[in-house]
Amino acid sequence: MTDKSTAIILQTVERAPQWVRRDLCSTDQTARTQAEETLAAMIADALSRSDDLSE
């Protein structure tokens, strides 16, 4: 992974909504799964946008 990708991922995690952060630690499997999927989608979107800007 490049330094640029690492920075993008870190920035995305830093701006994750509070409910995502809370639900990542939840004992409720459904809530945790939803938070994981949301965070993954946010990261994928940020990386995709970065690729679009590079072209």
Image: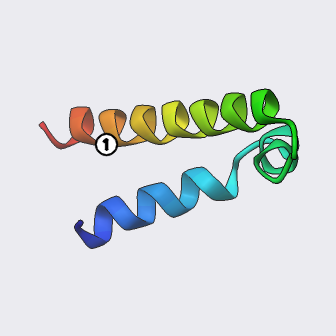
* Quadrant where the N terminus is found in the figure: bottom left
* Quadrant where the C terminus is found in the figure: top left
Q: Residue at x 47, y 56 (%)?
A: 9
Q: Quadrant of residue 35?
A: top right
Residues packed near mark 1 inside 10 Å, few (<14), some (14 to 19) or many (20 plus): some
Residue 12 drawn at (x, y percent): 57, 50
Residue 8 drawn at (x, y percent): 43, 56
Q: Quadrant of residue 11?
A: bottom right
Q: Quadrant of residue 14?
A: bottom right
Residue 33 drawn at (x, y percent): 67, 33
Amino acid type for the residue under numbered disc 1: Ser
* Front residue (pair 10, 55): 10
* Front residue (pair 37, 18): 37
* Front residue (pair 8, 20): 20
Residue occupied by mark 1: 50
Q: Residue at x 69, y 50 (%)?
A: 15
User: In the image, is 41 to the left or to the right of 3?
Assistant: right
User: In the image, is 49 to the left or to the right of 30?
Assistant: left
* Front residue (pair 43, 36): 36
Residue 37 drawn at (x, y percent): 58, 31
Furthest-left residue in this view: 55
Find numbered disc 1 in the image and state the secondary structure of the residue it sits on.
helix
User: In the image, is 2 to the left or to the right of 17?
Assistant: left
Q: Is residue 6 above or below residue 32?
A: below
Q: Residue at x 81, y 31 (%)?
A: 31
